[in-house]
Amino acid sequence: MLFFQTQTVSQVLQKMREQIEPLNEKITIFIEESLGMIVADPLISAEYSPNFVRSTVDGYAVISSDTFGASDTMPAYIKIKGSVQMGEETKMLLSMGETVYVPTGGMVPAGADAVCMIEYTENLNGLLNIYKQVAPMENCIQIGEDIVKGEIILQKGHRIRSQDIALLASLGMKQVMVKKPPIVGYLSTGDEIVSYETSHLPIGKIRDSNVASIRAACKQMNASFVYGGIVKDSEQDLLPACQSLLDEVDLLVISGGSSVGERDYSYAVFNQLGKPGVYVHGISIKPGKPTLIGQIGKKPILGLPGHPVSASVIFEIFGKEMLRCLLGTYENPLFTRRKAKILRNIPSQSGRTDYFRVQLVNENDEWIAYPVYGKSGVLNTLVKSDGLAVIPEEAEGVKAGEWVEVILLS
């Protein structure tokens, strides 16, 4: 076996994107359940929005040319014809020299092409004084100005946000077709590992915090999670457990057993599950160098280091990317990354990408990154961190005052 023929982060990500094929299964769900889901096919509007000319202010619908030249000293005088009720259709037709009161969101009657804000008017016994002229289309939204019938409103591969759901609801779309979320199967390995629900922890044992962390990370990606339990440090126990779980999941994740110790069997087990097997064993990264990545048929496999911080960082960088590949989508990095000025010198090794835990503070409209120090088995450092500062493989550390890219921890 060839251990730790390490590859760079960029090499590994490129291999994953080339190897992992998107899942094709689609499901139809109600829009209130669609937050974070991936649009399976382009969504097309079946109607105009708005479907009537709508006022954006409380005021008076007018023919704009009737107001030209109006000012505080020389108001325009227009006859008030009536008013429009909120939520009701009006059949009124305005002629030159006429106006109608319209509330915010109300329908602008035919003939009118603008709305004058009530603040610039005065009602004198049915004669409206207008003290400010308005331009055509001012203070009103035209039919289809928001959405045109037949328009693509959400593209295939778009991750649905709360504002997207609001738009779908405004168009009367009750359901949406999305890509079926991937199913992640997870196994913990190690004779020392016990359930995180263990109340009284025996000396020498460690609660399985990784399963809670990875389950939560999967939930962030809207992936389903299947827990296969804790498996002893034994190839005879690990192999059947992996085989059983692999049949029902789209991505298999193992925590622990990815290093080169006498009792680290993940590499051997992964290669017995099927072809092509492991194609990454060791990444030029800190933390998380002893990481396994491979594929059984079309199903990706990921072997995480056992240390909690390493496991969380590796899943953040590679596990979530595997899920994106399965969904056939890539996130906009602007939403998950931020530039920050590092506060202190951080050493690094050239040829290795380091992910350093940092706290972020906004000082004088600049983001400042304060390093959070600690070993990879100390979870408290992640709790104190807002993100991971990236020190690229070509750098030999960063100096205080330099700008770094920070991956935000959600």
Image (cartoon, rainbow, N blue to C red):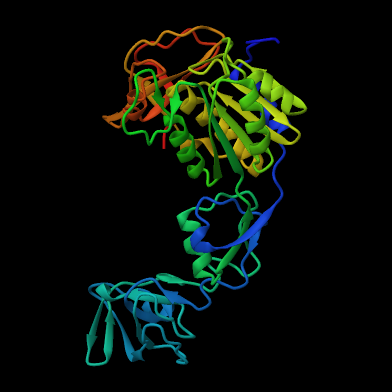
Work out which quarter of the rendered image holds the C terminus and state it.
top left
- Give residue 325's quadrant in the image: top right
Q: Is 219 on the left or on the right of 120, as rendered?
A: right
Q: Is residue 343 visible?
A: yes
Which residue is nearer to you in this view: 257 or 244? 244
Which residue does the image show at 32% across and 90% down from the upper left? 80
- Give residue 275's quadrant in the image: top right
Which residue does the image show at 37% across and 26% down from the upper left? 382
Which residue is nearer to you in this view: 395 or 273? 273
Q: Where is residue 294 drawn, in percent x and y?
A: 68, 26
Number of marks: 0
Q: Where is residue 249 drawn, in percent x and y?
A: 64, 42
Q: Where is residue 386 drawn, in percent x and y?
A: 36, 30
Q: Is residue 135 visible?
A: no
Q: Is residue 341 above or below residue 105?
A: above
Which residue does the image show at 67% across and 23% down from the upper left? 269
Q: Is 48 on the left or on the right of 207, as rendered?
A: right
- Give residue 59's quadrant in the image: bottom left
Q: Is residue 229 above or below residue 284?
A: below
Which residue is nearer to you in this view: 396 or 68? 396
Q: Where is residue 4 drawn, in percent x and y?
A: 63, 10
Which residue is nearer to you in this view: 325 or 368? 325
Work out which quarter of the rendered image holds the N terminus and state it.
top right
